[in-house]
Structures are given as C-alpha cells and as structure tokens.
Amino acid sequence: MFLAKRIYKVNQVSPTQNDQGKMGDEVVKKSQSKENLEEEEEERGNWGNQCEFFLSCLGYAVGFGNVWRFPYLCYKNGGAVFLIPYVIMLLCAGLPLFFMELALGQYASLGPNLIFPEIAPLFTGLGWAMVLISALVAVYYNIIMAWTVFYTFASFTSVLPWSHCDNDFNSVSCFTDDANIACQNQSMYYYNKSCVDTNTFCGIENYIEFNQTYCEDPNNSSIVVPAKGLVKRISASEDYFKNRMLEVSGRSWEDMGSMRWELVGCLAISWVIVAACLAKGVKSSGKVVYFTALFPYAVLLILFVRGMTLEGAMKGIEFYIMKPDTSKLLELEVWSDAATQIFYSLGSSFGGLITLASYNKFKNNCMRDAMVIAFANCSTSVFAGFVIFSILGFLATELGVEVGDVVDSGSGLAFIVYPAAVARMPLPPLWALLFFFMLITLGLDSQFTMVETLTTAVLDQWVDLRKHKMKIVFGICFILFLLGLTMCLQGGILMFELFNGWSAGISVIICAILEVVVIQYIYGINKFVSHITDDMGIYMPLPLKAYWYTTWAVVTPGLLFVILILSFVNISPASWGTYVFPANIQVLAWFVCICSIVIIPICAIWVIWKGDKKGKELFQYSEDFCPAHERKARERAATGGAKGAVFRYTYENEGFAEPQAKIYPNLSGDEKPPPYNNGNGVYSNHI
C-alpha cells in the first residue's frame, strides 16, 4: 500500500465537502500549478525557455578567441593537421568539463560560490575563486569592447582614417605600401609623409649610404645592412591603433601618461549596454542573446562570401588549412596549444557555465546541450579561420608578400591586420562596420555571462538583496568600470596585457583540477552520475556513460595536470611586444595570478577555525546539495509553510481518502496534525 503525506499551501478557507477524490485531485493540481508558478517566478528567476539557455551558453563559448586566436594557431601548428590534437583535446578535456559544470549547476540551482560549500566544506573557497577570476577577466574584456566601439564610430566616414598617413595624429614612422612603392619607383624611400633619398634615409639611424639599397655603419665599415629594414616604420593601421586610439608611443610603467577620455566614453558605453541587458538577470539577457548570439554567424557568412570573391582568397585558404604539416604532431607545443585553446574557448572553471545552468529547468537535457554547443564552438572556430584567411590572402596579394607576412594573432589581427585588409576592399567603411559590430556582439555574450556570475554570487549569498537586483547589477558594472579606468590611460595597454596574460591562466587550470577532484572523488562519481540519470532523468546510453566515467575519473584530471605542468615550464615574464615589464610589475603580475586561487586555502582555514565542521565532515556534502525544489520544501517545512494556514492532505490510497480536508493553522513544519478517525475506528498513521 502506498502511504504518503503531501503538504500544500491554501487560503484560510476550508474546502467544501464534495466528492473527496475529485476535491483531492483538484486541490493537488491547483496547488502544484501555483507552486510551479511561484518557483518559476521566484526572486532568483529562470530562463524564459530552453532556447535562451542554449544561445547564452553558445554565445559565452564563442568569443574573441574563435576569431582572432584559433586561425593563427591553426596556421602556426601545421594547418589542417592541428585539428587532430584540437578534437582530441575537446573530447578528453573540453567536453567533459563543459558537461560536468552544466549538470552541476542545473542539479543544484546554485551559483559556484554556494555549490562547493555544500559539496565539501573544506573547498568553500573554490567557487569564490571562480567568481573572482570572472571579475578580473570582465575588467579587461570590456576594454576590448571599448576599443571595438571606438573603431565602430571611426568607421562612419567615407575614408577610413587607418588607410593613409595624412592625418594629423600620424607619426613620422607611418607608411603605406602604395606610398612606399611610389617612392621606390623613384629610387627613394617613404618616410615622414615624403620621399627621401637613400643617404637621408640611412641617416635617420646614424648610418651612411653604401649604395641605393644598403646602409653602412660609419664607425665600422664591415657592417652593411639593407636600408629597407634599418629604419623602423609601422603601417598606417598600426599607427592608428597605437598613436590615435591608444596614444601609447613613448609610454612605460614609469610614465603611464594621461587619461584617454574618448576611450573612457567608449568604456562607459560598453558597461551601460551590459548593465541594461542584465538589469533583470536572465529574464532580460535571455532575450538579448537571440540577436547577439546569432548575428556574428550572419556576419561571418557575409564576410566569407565577400572574401572568397577577392583576388588571392584561395592563396590565404591554402596557407590556412590546405597544406597540412604532419610533422607538427610530434611537437609537444602543438598539443599544448590545442589543449589550452579548447580549454579557454569553452570557458570552463570560470563559474559562468555553472551560473547559466543554475537557471535551467531541472529536467533539461544538459548533456545534449553540452555536446551540441561544444562542437558548434569548435566548428565556429574553423569557419572563422576560412573567413579571416580568405581576406588575409587578398591583403597579401595586394601587398605582393607571402600570407605568413601579414598573419597576426590577438588584438594585432583584430585592430591592425584586418582593418588594413578592409581598407583595401571596395566600400571599406561598410565592411569595417560589419566586422567591428560583429566583434561587439561576440564580446557581449561572454561579458554577459561573466557579469551574471558576479551578480548571481552576490544575490545568492545575500538573498535579501534580490529585491534590489537592478541596483546590484548597475553597482557591480560601475565598480568594474572604475577598475578598468587604469587601462584607459595612454599607457593603459600595459595594464591590459598584464591582466590579459595573468588573470586567467594558471589559476583557472588549478580551479579546474580541484573541481574535478572534488566532484568525482570526494563527492563521488557514482552519486554525481545518478543525479544526472535518475534525478534529472537524462538518458545516458552505455557507451556515453563509459565515456563520461573514463574522462571524469582519469583522462580529464590527468590531462589538466599535464597542462598545468607545461604552463609552469613555458611561463615567460610579463611583457608587451619586446617591452619586458620591470621587476616590481612582475610581482604585480603574479599577484593578479594568485589572488583568486589564494582564496581557496584562506576559506579552508576559516572553515576549520570556525569549528562547525570537523574531521570527515569537512569532506562530506550537506543536505542542501540537492535540487532547488527539495530545499524549498524543507524550508517551508522548517518555517511552518507559507503565510497563513498549512493544508495537509494525508492519505494511504484513494480508498482511504480523508472524508474532510482539515486546516491546522498553527502547525510548524515538523509537527503533525492529530490522528483522525475514518469512521470505522481506524486512525491515520501520519508520516
């Protein structure tokens, strides 16, 4: 016989005595419907639908790195052959971590700062470390957004300002290939907006003319160098980036210069956009991602079609992926690059995936989402490479050089090489606008998730603040805006490069290793898998189950440990280009690196000192590591239910339904109503 007790919220009016079975079903249905609605619309919120979650995760995973880093790595590491280690690393590390975090967040409906204290109190600081990493990255990530906004405004002109050297801001070192070729036709060299003879050109570096193409050291006649490479000159696009937007020339850590107020304005615009889109949490950002997550694909497709029609496009494609170098597979650096790229591209261990999934429906098939998003992210990277290299092939053809001479990575590709390429295309302002607006939408999705991670951490930790969600969102964005102002100085790119290289490197890998160990070994891989299959009802075929067990238990933690070792071995001093930062700044770089992970031992010491948990309890999960509806039921029971009366509908089965519903207004959650007589002298047995 089925014996149970159900607790539902009702008004203070006793239900009318009617057909008891019908009444019971109606009360149950209405109560469940009301509770589901309340849980759906409670302060924390949920995704409006499954598509919003999917697009948010896709937008978070697909970011700047897919466009400006993966194509360069593919070219650098053997072309198409790089896809072999890339896919292997996806299957061994990227996808397992991605799914694990989605399942973890969806099961508990908590942000990272509250999940890990419930799994293993000794690792309370792990979630906060992830939150701090997201905060550090969000600070410099929006600087890239500010640069992109700056370039977007600059594109509203008939002649792009980085296409020539006739602007007032151009340095004497600025040159364009067209102007340089015009001077070479006269056996002269282009410098400082004019053509100069060989002797004058050599004299810039205190050399003298040896002949029309070589310069000689006046103090040592045996030193003869080509004139073309003697004098440092920079392209018009690089000159615009450094001397117009950044105004960084001549700056160092000892002299950071004044504030670039135009960049401050662009940074403010970027943060206002982020804050406005996140004002209502996932309820508002979930609507925005329909545009921001899908628009980049439309632009990439348009740019690809345009790029393939340009002269030299196939030259770039061949250079990118059609000449594989299989010998590269024997190089350890290639495998290290593949592992690092897939790890950072998917965004694991930043806390963002746990946060996004925590707003999911409990029964959502997050395993399917993880697999689709991970492979879509990788496919986007490959496709973006075709787009970029088709246009770089055109640029190389226009300049009469090899494709390898114009390839760059990171900000150099996005703000120097690519602008130089679009400046030579028909209707350059149109293609510039499309490209930079695409970068804005690429960055926004990632930024949404990182800021949402911070906001969720604050609102989960201090629940009373949820009624001030909009104020909290704008407050966090304002604080991050202030922290980013140092990167708006004339020498601000030095601070940017420090954060870019050190805020989310070794620290993220350490968090990932600890995360896998805590969940799979301390909590238990069998319990975790049972939550996915039994509790959340996600069907997991036997081959997939074997794959998850193998990767989570052995392959992924082992690979992460290898990546960590390689990261320490290959570490280099903080620098920007050829400028190596001074010793005190190297200390600052290490502080930025470890300030997040140091929270982990600090919180562990605090938990031990507090004394609430001792011995094995430090490694044992609490009853609050459970689905949100179970926590809510326990909270209602502990507080005596909602405001008003508690209606208890107690039955053994339909045949023993209580003849009349009873109201017990003053019962606490653990108290039981007095037994009743069913009319046959049998009293109920409440449980």
Image (spheres, rainbow, N blue to C red):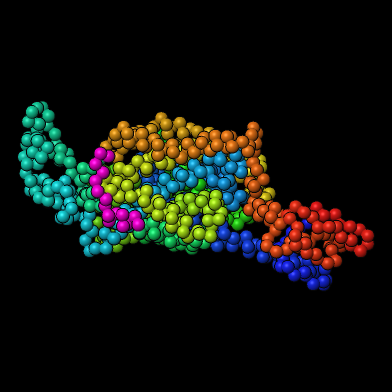
- Report x, y in % for residue 233: 18, 44
Q: Is 666 or 410 nearer to us in this picture?
A: 666
382 above or below 45? above
Whether residue 220 is visible: yes
Residue drawn at (27%, 37%), measured in percent from left and top?
579
Whether residue 89 is visible: no
- Report x, y in % for residue 65: 40, 48
* Residue farthest toward the front in the current orientation of the protein: 666
- Report x, y in % for residue 244: 23, 52
Residue drawn at (39%, 35%), measured in percent from left and top?
590
Residue 682 lies in what quarter of the image? Answer: bottom right
Q: Is 124 or 536 nearer to us in this picture?
A: 124
Magenta region, residue range = 253-268
Whether residue 393 sits left or right of residue 280 in the image: it is left
Whether residue 317 sits left or right of residue 428 in the image: it is right
Q: Which quarter of the rendering shows the N terminus? A: bottom right
Task: Please tell me whether residue 655 belongs to the stretch shown in magenta.
Answer: no
